[in-house]
Image (cartoon, coloured by chain):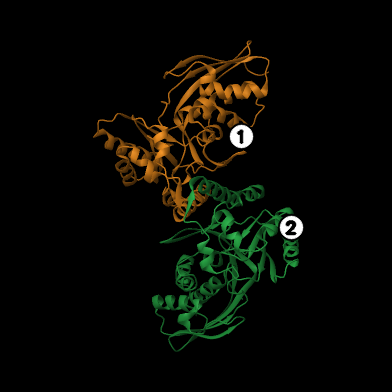
Chain colours: A green, B orange
Amino acid sequence: MNKNEIKIFSPATVANVSCGYDVLGFCLDTIGDEMVVRKTDRKGIYITKIEGYDLPLDATKNVAGVSALAMIADAKPNFGFEIEIYKNIKPGSGIGSSSASASGSVFAINELLGRPYNKTQVTDFAMKGEALASGSEHADNLAPGIFGGFTLVRSTSPLEVLQLPTPKDVYATIIHPQIEIKTSDARAILPKTFPLKDAITQWANLGSFVHALHTSDYELLKRSLQDVIVEPHRSQLIPHFAEVKLAALAHGALGASISGAGPSIFALSKGIENAKNVEKAMRNVYSKTSIAFETYVSKINTEGIREI
Amino acid sequence: MNKNEIKIFSPATVANVSCGYDVLGFCLDTIGDEMVVRKTDRKGIYITKIEGYDLPLDATKNVAGVSALAMIADAKPNFGFEIEIYKNIKPGSGIGSSSASASGSVFAINELLGRPYNKTQVTDFAMKGEALASGSEHADNLAPGIFGGFTLVRSTSPLEVLQLPTPKDVYATIIHPQIEIKTSDARAILPKTFPLKDAITQWANLGSFVHALHTSDYELLKRSLQDVIVEPHRSQLIPHFAEVKLAALAHGALGASISGAGPSIFALSKGIENAKNVEKAMRNVYSKTSIAFETYVSKINTEGIREI
């Protein structure tokens, strides 16, 4: 018999991973939202509680509600769901806040329904919620949350997500400077076209990064973690980006770049000690400024969203 | 004791493999040049015989000579080398004719010297010869010939070649229509810049292709073998390209695209029977035209250049 209630952890995620703009992401473990979802007699989706951040309770205006509504429109259960959201990931931080909500609700409902949908289908429903936040259907934060580990979104239409291997010693460090980057600014600062030679550099590095994940080649991960397309532009919107990146690399990071559309900056390191040293180095940069910040060190979460 | 003479087979290669323009290549087995290289008392490089095609005997004007001269300038042996070239790969065919010459001579000399250079260094010397043919230093045909199998050139400066895994049932079909495409035309037809969304599609596919090679996922190889950047432009220079590609796909090919800068067209298939069916389908297209053509079916040569 299916359960009537489930509590889940929906982790933060990093998208636009350096050479893999728009396609490559990975899943964090030390920060995420919690959600409780339970069946109710009345049909529909009801968000009954949101703690942590001020977000709409109206299911049609909340990303978790929109994705859930899309799923029940397809599944047509003869009951409904109540959702409680305990939000830890600050909206606009660049580590997949809206994705964690959009995917958490449908992951939970799929479990309560007896898992009629596979992970790709769950991601597809979550994209409906994500579209409410970003204006278009993206899966680059959703995929790592739902599949876990490193993921590559080969295509969004039709949706195809590849689960890539995760070398066991890769750790992430995140610094979230508490500034706001408007999505419209992050988009406007990107040129519409790019020189072929830069695109070639980017895909050579992404191909190499995928090979490095398969072969656990940390030196190759390091050489491949370069973004010649987006980072040079968007990093201008993040104060002290260059210093943070340099500090991370100087303290042993394999690479560092913008998380999502920013303002968070991620680094990847081999081993948790390196990741902690990188955290300290990143903190030092922002400590000298008036900008408040949070940092996280996390293993790569290869499981993704999970019941707790 | 090192040998005084060596005979080698230097295979044809396919570069610009679909989604991997400028970085991804693979090595053929059923067509290639043969070369005999022997030590001589007089220092220097002497091309003593060329059969098959009319190419310069002057070592400074022959790609095999130029790469060989670059290697001995570094190795400084107190003897020289004579080179005989038995050319089977037609220059300008798009399956790495100049690369086979440029890499064959330095592969052979490295063997006769007792192998002082690794494969990356051999490729570096071969690039000097390749530059004579193409005007700039490229490794996308050299790397598969020297390393074997599928290769990804992550960077040419410094040179870094990745040897990718080769799923055991992948076979290549090549059709070489006997027309000439001028390198200047092949370059001029490419736009200088590309929309970001097309570049994203390309690197999503290349990342997926690398993953598919690692997982022997033939269906993913098929979905990934798409070139939205170069093929739409350069295919205009190859008469009947669209028909050949469609015929190949209709007869079971995983994918088909331009080999190098053309005019050859390659297809990849799962299994030799499919590859032969694809060959027949490709031949049918050109048989109805006045254009002469050659075809080849080949396993992927995972060894590369070899002593015979």
Lateral position of residue B240 relative to residue B213, left or right? left
Q: Quadrant of residue A5?
A: bottom right
User: Callout 2 environment at 10 Å: few (<14), some (14 to 19), or many (20+)?
Assistant: many
Amino acid type, mark 1: Thr
Lateral position of residue A72 relative to residue B293, left or right? right
Of all residues shown, which one is farthest toward the top? B41
- Residue A140 vs A8, above or below: the answer is above
**Closer to us: B57 or B107:** B57
Q: Is residue A169 visible?
A: no
Q: Chain of mark 1?
A: B
Question: Residue A167 in the image: x percent, y percent?
Answer: 64, 55
Amino acid type, mark 2: Asn
Quickly name the residue at label 2: A274
- Residue B106 vs B198, above or below: the answer is above
Question: Residue B242 in the image: x percent, y percent?
Answer: 31, 43
Quickly name the residue at label 1: B120
Q: Tag 2, which secondary structure?
A: helix
Residue beneath the point at 59% across and 66% down = A13
Q: Chain of mark 2?
A: A
**Closer to us: B235 or A143:** B235
Q: How many discs appear?
A: 2
Residue beneath the point at 39% across and 45% down = B255
Q: Tag 1, which secondary structure?
A: helix
Q: Quadrant of residue A303?
A: bottom right
